[in-house]
Each structure stands twice: as C-alpha cells, then as structure tokens.
Amino acid sequence: MNELRTAVELLRRSLDAIEPHLTGPNVVPSDLEEFKGTLDKARNRVQAILNAAQAADVPEVVVKFRLRRTAHLCQGVVGGFSDWTISARTPGFARLRALVEETLEGVEALRSRS
C-alpha cells in the first residue's frame, strides 16, 4: 500500500507542475484534449478497479467499463462533428459510419428481445 501512496503523491506533484501550462496564449486545444483524455482514462481505470473490488461479477464490471470508455470516445467523435474537425471527407469516416449503423442494428435487436 505504501507504493500506491508514493505513486499518488508523485501524480499530485506532476499535476501541480502541469497546471500552469494549461492556460495561456500558447496552449493548443488539441493538446488540452489529449491531456483530458489521459486523465479520463486514468480515472476510468481507477473506477473499474474500485467496482471490481466490490462486485461479485467481475466480467460484468469489465463490460460496463468498456461501454463507458466507448461512450467517452463517441463523445469525442460528436465533438469532432460539432467543431468540424471530423467530416464526411475525413479518412475512416465511411468505416465509422458502417460501424455505427451495425451497432445501431445490434442495439435494436437487443431491444426487440426485451
């Protein structure tokens, strides 16, 4: 447990050192998004560990974690559409659209079973 406390303290010091660099005229929005994504990933992993430690059904917790992570990634894609960094001309858009359509069909099939 002492190793975890040391890691948390190191993380706190690192975040304190990073904080002054998060504002100002030279900050690139994409860098801030990457920073946010990294923090979100760490937070999601901690939450998954906490949930697994309390859950009787660990596989279900893993599925929920993956679904939350997917939802987070989808929010980023929606943001890309909103700020026009993603469009129909973006490489991979056609594949993304096909995957979304396939996913929606799967969701609809699940709904019809219940």
Image (cartoon, rainbow, N blue to C red):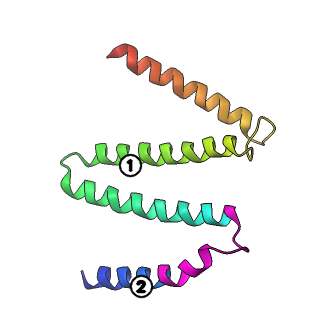
Q: Which x, y percent locates residue 99?
A: 61, 31
Q: Which residue is mark 1?
A: 65
Residue pictured at 48% horizontal, 79% vertical: 15
Q: Which residue is mark 2?
A: 10
Q: Secondary structure at mark 1?
A: helix
Q: Is residue 22 magenta?
A: yes
Q: Secondary structure at mark 2?
A: helix
Q: Residue furthest right?
A: 89
Q: CA distance from mark 2 to mark 1?
A: 26 Å
Occupied quadrant, residue 67: top left
Callout 2 crowding tier (Cα within 10 Å): few <14, some 14–19, many ≥20 = few
- Magenta segment: 15-29
Q: Of the residues shown, which amino acid type is indicated by label 2?
A: Leu
Is 101 left or right of 15, judged from the image as shown? right
Helix, strand or loop: magenta stretch: helix
Residue pictured at 29% horizontal, 42% vertical: 60
| In this view, 62 is above or below 12 | above
Residue pictured at 53% horizontal, 64% vertical: 38
Q: Is residue 9 magenta?
A: no
Is 105 left or right of 2, judged from the image as shown? right
